[in-house]
Structure formats: C-alpha cells, structure tokens
Amino acid sequence: MAKHKITLLPGDGIGPEVTAAVVAILECAGVDIEWEKYFVGSEALSRFGDPLPQEVLDSILRNKVALKGPVTTPVGTGFQSINVRLRKTLDLYANLRPVRSQPNIKTRYEDIDLIVVRENTEDLYSGLEHEIVPGIVESIKIITERASTRIAKFAFEYAQTHGRKRVTAVHKANIMKLSDGLFLSCVRKVAEDHPNIVADDRIVDNCCMQLVMNPNQFDMLLLENLYGDIVSDLTAGLVGGLGVVGSANIGENGAVFEAVHGSAPDIAGQNKANPLALLQSAVMMLQHVGEMEAAARVLTAIVKVLGSGPEQRTGDIGGSGNTTDFTAAICNALRKRTRADE
C-alpha cells in the first residue's frame, strides 16, 4: 500500500477536534498517511503575522493534497477568508460538493443524490470593489471565457467518469446578458463535445424554487462562484445541513478537502462536534489519491453507524452521543469489516 504525504490544517474552534477524529478514523481504515500539520487563521496570524503563511502554501504545492478543518473568518473586518485565499492563490478552480441523503437524518426529502460544481476563482469573489464616493460602493463581477470553459469541462468530464446523466447550468443570463451570457455560451460549447450527457440550464431564482419543490429532478448543477456558494448550501440543507456533506477544491496545482461548516467556537472543547462533514471530505480525498477500497469501506462504516442507535451519533443529527462516541463507532465498524474480509 502506498504511503501518502498530506498537508493537515486543523483550523480553529471545533476544527482540531473533528480533524483529530478523522485522522484516527483514516488510521483505523489502514491508510498510510504522513501528515504535515500547520496552523492557519487567527493562531497563525498571532504566531507568524500572516493567517495563511507561505510555508502552508508550499506544503500544499509540494504534497498536492490537503485536509482542512473549519477556520473562523472575521465578519466585516479583519483578515480575508482563508478559504478564498487558498482557492485564488493555488488556483483551485473547481469546488465539488456531493449532496446525498444519509440514514437516520430526517429531512423533507428522501433519496437525494446531487452533485454541485462551482467555479471557484472569479465572479464577484474577485474582490474588486471600491468606494466611488462616500455612500456608494462598486463591486465588479468578472466572468471570463477561460474560467467558464475550464469549469464546464471539469463538470462534463466528472459526469462522464462518474456515470452522471445530466448537467444543468445555473445562471442569470436574462438580466446579466454579457457576463452570465458568456458563462452560458461557454457551457453550451463544452456540452457539444459530450453528446451522451444531457445539458440544460435554469435561471438561478427558478432553480432555487425547483430545488425546494422537487430536488430529485436534478442530477448535476454547474454554477458561477456566487450562485454556487449559495446553492451548494441550499442543497446541503436538503439532506441535513453543512454538518453532513463533504467538499473539495480542486485545481491543477493540488486539491484541498474541507468541511464547509463553521468553526462553532461556542462548543469547542466540549466533545460535542460532529466529524461527519470532514469525514465525508476525507472520503473524497481518499478517492482522489487512489485509495478507492479504503474510501468504500469508510463510506460503508458511515452508513452503518448512522443507521444504528442514537448513542453513536452526535446531537446535531438527532443522536445522544459525542465526538468520541461517533469516532469509536466508525472505527469499530471498520475493524469488524476488516476482520470479516480476512
């Protein structure tokens, strides 16, 4: 079995707790990983004068893979989002969010299986905003043919290799005829090269309504940055929230797998945090580095634990257990599976 060197960014708040849980689970799964651990966020700022030190970027560029816990982002003031800086600096242009129903997590819908693909590098997230005169601020939306074509190719190639049947581009080209019109035009051109994948589109407000009314009508959603940020959280809410879905940011220079929920400082250090979202991200990471068998075993263990008694699940998903209980239950399921396979 190959040994993997992976950058580890525990984050802050509940980040170190859920990260430690996932590291323990991956060890139980028998994956040989050498972790390079670094601080980011407020702790890195106080220690090194930068919330995202250059040595962190160098480690990710060297290892090509990172696992990242949640990091607190100051609202309105303070340093720029670490997530945004990582995506822009490393050109992690594709955000991938699988959204699937989980056992024993009660929601309004059943059997949801969606893939959300979000362009990660431009749009209103380019950060080009300024005050024209006092009381008037201008934010500039950037949409390029290069980025739109690149993310469309990623989505259609993912559909091709993962057996998905349909890609729906989400836009507001009826109003933003040039910017969103360019995005939609690029998607349609790429779609021509994939005739076996159904390609259609929805205006973003209508798409949100349709998701709430009948999410099962969609297969894959392809969105610009801002729409993708909003809709990916909306779809997570359909299956239980940000605490149960994984996320990946992928580019030619590497990939960062992260939990997209908040750092929840109010419950930090209380053994209440749910590691499931970061664990789902870690499963995606295992698949990315070719550990398909281990990824499958962890997914099987997740389904088994979520389908069992409440004492093995954390309180946010209807359980009576804690972080330690959930971690131990997943590890026990993995050990039983391993013994059964021997």
Image: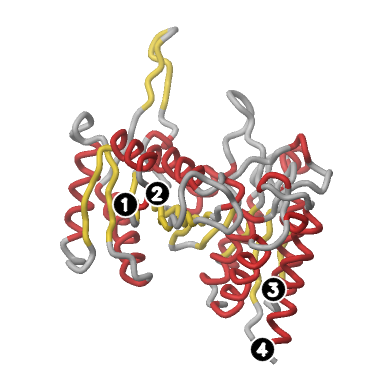
Question: Mark number for residue 97?
Answer: none
Q: Label 2: which residue?
A: 118
**Mark 1 or mark 3, earlier in chain:** 3
* Tag 4 and tag 2, C-beta contact below 8 Å: no
How far, Cα to Cα, is label 4 from label 2? 38 Å
Disc 3 is placed on an element classified as: strand
> Which one is nearer the viewer's eye here, 227 or 90?
227
Q: Is residue 290 left or right of residue 197?
A: right
Residue sitting at the far right: 270
Q: Amino acid at mark 3?
A: Ile
- Badge 4 marks a residue whose secondary structure is helix
Please name the amino acid that badge 2 sits on: Arg
Q: Which sits earlier in the primary sequence, circle 1 or circle 2?
A: 2
- Residue beneath label 4, please? 341
Residue occupying the point 42% across, 47% down: 120
Residue that mark 3 sits on: 33
